[in-house]
Amino acid sequence: MKNKLILALEKEGFLLNEEQLDKFVIFSSLIKEWNTKINLTSLDEDDDIIYKHFLDSLFCLKTGLVWQGKKVIDVGTGAGFPGIPLKIMLGEDIKLTLFDSVQKKVNFLDLVVKELGLNGVKCVHGRAEEYGKMIDYREKYDIVLARAVARLPLLLELCIPFVNLGGFFLAMKGPEGTKELDESEYALKQLGGKINSIDNFFLKDQDYTRVLISFKKNKLTPEKYPRKAGTPQKKPL
Ligand code: SAH
């Protein structure tokens, strides 16, 4: 695992110290161990963990966003993606909230944070539709992240309320990302975001395409958003 990991990350320009490598290795064993007990991820082979979880998460660092000193939330983080790999790389540079609506996943994340000795990470159980309205969470984050949570018009309603004015939402999308973007014009206008950047990444060995779209919050989100749980899913903006 360790040697494969070093090679894969180096090829994409990520050089890690021993401590960071060890953290990735421990994280991957915890995923494999716990995936037999709770449903964390459908991908738990070494190659999948290295490329589709770790490396994929680190592509966020190639988008040109500035991370140092930022408050970050990963909405619908699941087994910790992209949040945990980013925290391993950035260390004390970011304060991170890992957020998910499934309690078992949040318990797993608490364990990972402890075993990896990560500082400045908070694991929170809740629904974005509710927390996006709460004073301690609403418009309190410099960078909001989400991977594989929902189609873009819905995802924007779940995520933009967390972003502070002038902050960013980074959506990790597949090849269909730009098409979803075409359907998101109305949602963006309503919620107070505008497109900031679009970056494409391609892993040839893995036949894997990732589209990272960042949005800048240029207006406060009207109080009526996010709508109550269930409504954004039933009637996406
Ligand atoms: N980001 C992870 C997990 C994706 S699966 C990855 O890419 O591997 C989607 C996750 O989002 C699930 O763990 C689910 O529990 C969570 N989720 C879905 N809707 C949510 C909501 N409204 N609020 C909070 N979490 C949500």
Image (cartoon, helix red, strand yellow):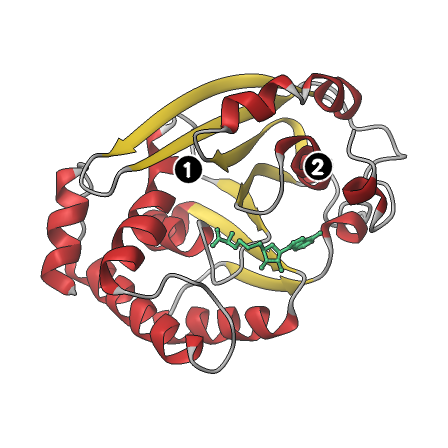
The quarter in which the N terminus is drawn is: bottom left
- Residue type, numbered disc 1: Gln
Is there a contact, CB below 8 Å, between mark 2 and mark 1?
no
Q: Height in image: 16 above or below 107?
A: above
Residue matched to label 2: 154
Name the residue that disc number 1 marks.
68
Q: Percent from the top left, x then y, of residue 30?
A: 36, 75
User: Would you call the spot at circle 1 few (<14 residues within 10 Å), some (14-19), or many (20 or more)?
Assistant: few
> In the rendered structure, which amino acid carries the disc numbered 2?
Leu
Ligand 1 within 8 Å of disc 1? The answer is no
Vertical placement of residue 103 versus 219, above or below = below
- x%, y% of residue 130? 80, 52
Residue pictured at 60% horizontal, 29% vertical: 167
Q: Quadrant of residue 22?
A: bottom left
Residue count near mark 2 (Cα–Cα under 10 Å), binned few <14, some 14–19, many ≥20: many
Dot 2 or dot 1: first in sequence order is 1
Q: Is 55 positioned to the left or the right of 98 in the image?
A: left
**Quadrant of the rendered structure where residue 144 is?**
top right
Picture mark count:
2
Residue 230, label in figure: none
User: Cα distance, mark 2 to mark 1?
Assistant: 29 Å
**Which quadrant of the frame does ligand 1 lie within?**
bottom right
**Image: 138 above or below 115:** above
Q: Residue at x 24, y 63 (%)?
A: 46
Viewport quadrant of the C terminus: top right
Q: Where is residue 212 in the image (x, y as percent from the top left)?
A: 44, 30
Question: Element type at marker 1?
Answer: loop
142 or 152, which is in the foreground? 152
Residue farthest toward the right in the current orientation of the protein: 224
Could you say whether the residue bearing mark 2 is in a helix, strand or loop?
A: helix
Residue at 35% over, 70% down: 116
